[in-house]
Structure formats: structure tokens, C-alpha cells
Amino acid sequence: MRAITSLLAAAVILFPFNSYADTVEVLVRSLKTSSNYKVRVTAATLLSRYRGDRRALAALLRALHKDRHPTVRGTAAFSLGKLGDSSVIPDLEKIAKSRKEDRYVRKMAKRALKMLKSGCPAVDLKGKRLYIHIGKFKVSGGHYYDKVKPAALRTFRKNLANLTMRVPYMTAYWPKCKAPRKRDLRRKKIKGFMVDGIIVIKQAPGEVRCKVKAIVATFPGKSIKMSTSASAAVGGSLTPDSVSTCVEAIAPVIFQGVRQYLVTQL
């Protein structure tokens, strides 16, 4: 990618981060309205941290197709690849094949497509100090809950990984989608931890209740360091959608507790 190191270093000055919601809104607005292409490049780069956020995805797609500067369009293409949402593959394929498009933009679109089709996100370990291995988790309950277990696991683990990736000094992924060994972490001067636990789902009259009991342990050593839990309830019957909504509400609360401990390990 074209040199933007100095821009990233100035990101805190360009975008005063007060909260997660404010951060995304400021980045989206800057990408859309700033007259300085360098600011738009920085915004497009930083939006790649917000996996699962539809606002980030929409803003990057708009920049890919409508921004007048090729460096911004190329950065938007690469960031879309890092977001990991396969729904943008048709847009990227169109750009990658367009003879009218700038060479740099086509190159970035091809790199993004490679990431998305391999299912393995690009991982930049620069500035990362903590690796968070998201465990398999287990869903309690008998066969009655089998139809909703996959949705609960998939949604909760995905949300936990996305939240981790939004913290500049954390990563939930390792290059080539491989879990790092102890010597890999030591070589990169990164501390490893694992978050795992149990998801409890119960159906009550008119609502679905869920609870997550999570532990933080060292990785790969798996020495337990702390535990946390959170509960939620949503109205409706027991379906994959209702369970997904329930555990999705819990993920930020669990992550907040995990993060409070991990900050002490820096």
C-alpha cells in the first residue's frame, strides 16, 4: 500500500475517540466529507477495525465506488477485505476487472478478494501487544436446544472476535489463520490469552434467556486468571434468531470484563 504511516500515527489527533459509536461516526463522516484525501485514506484504513459494523461496510463501499482519489479507493478496497464480509465480493470483482480503474485500486481489490475467498483475514501484528484466542465455548442443555446451539456459538464467538479487533493493541487472529505457538508469541513480543466458557440457554414463558460464563486463561499454557459472567433475555420463542440476538447483547458486557483484566497485563 502507498505510504500512510505518518497519517496513522496522527490518527488520534485527527479523530478524537470518545466512544465506540462516536469513533465510527467520525470516521464515516471524515471518509465521506473531508476535502483532504490523506484524511480520507486514514479514515478508510481505521474503519477496517470494525468487523461486523454495517456502517463501516457501507462507508467503505461508497468510497470504493465514488471517491475521486485512487489512493482512497484502493485503501477502501483493501479495508473491505479485512472486514471479512463476503457480500462485497461482487463489488470487488467488478473493480478488479475494470480496465478503466486505476492500477493501484485494481491491485488492492485483488488482494482483498484473495483474503475474502480464502476465509483468512489479513493480520498486521504491528503495535499488537495481546493475542486473544477465542475458545470453542460450549452450549449447555439437552437435545431440545440442538437447533439453536450453532447460532449461539457462531454469533457469540464472532462478536467477541470483532470486539477484540477493534482494540488497537489486541488481535484475535494470527497470520494464515493459525494459532500461534509460545515461541511465535515470544518472537513478536506479544502476550497470549484465551477466552472460553459456557453459554447457557433457557426458554421461559414468552422469552428466551441466555447467560455466558467466561474465563480468561493464559495461552497456550491455559492457566486460568479470571472469570466473568453476564445475562440477557429477549422476547419471543426459541429460534436461532432469538438466541443470536440474546448472546449478541451479552458479548460487549463479557468483553468489557475481559478487557479490564487484560489492560493490567500490558
Image: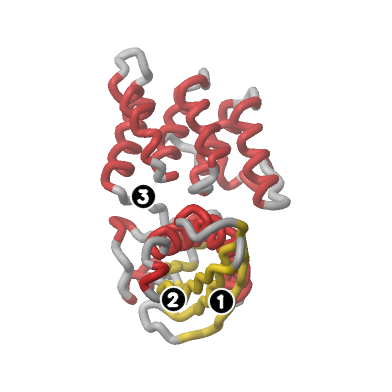
Q: Which residue: 36% across, 60% down?
A: 174
Comparing labels 1 and 3, the label whose residue is closer to the camera: 3
The kind of secondary structure element at disc 1 is: loop
Q: Quadrant of the C terminus?
A: bottom right
Residue shown at 31% from the left, 27% from the top: 93
Amino acid marked by disc 3? Pro
In the foreground, 185 or 100 = 100
Q: Which mark is residue 97?
A: none
Q: Which residue in the structure is indicated by mark 3?
A: 121
Q: Nearer the N terminus, badge 1 or badge 3?
A: 3
At label 2, the amino acid type is Ser
Query: Mark 1 — residue?
Result: 265
Q: Nearer the viewer, mark 2 or mark 1?
A: 2
Task: Relative to 216, say whether 127 is above or below.
Answer: above
Residue 29, placed above or below residue 207 = above
Who comes first in sequence, dot 3 or dot 2?
A: 3
Asked if the residue at tag 2 contacts the one at tag 3, i.e. Cβ–Cβ closer than 8 Å, the answer is no
Q: How far apart are the alpha carbons under marks 3 and 2?
A: 30 Å
- In primary-sequence order, the first of circles 2 and 1 is 2
Residue type, numbered disc 1: Gln
The residue under the point 53% across, 77% down is 213
Judge the density around disc 2: few (<14), some (14-19), many (≥20) Cα neighbours within 10 Å: some
- Measuring 62% from the left and 66% from the top, which residue is drawn there? 232
> Residue 131 location in percent, x, y?
44, 67
Image quadrant where one finds the N terminus: top left
Taking the image as shown, residue 18 lies to the left or right of residue 37, namely right
| Residue at mark 2 | 140
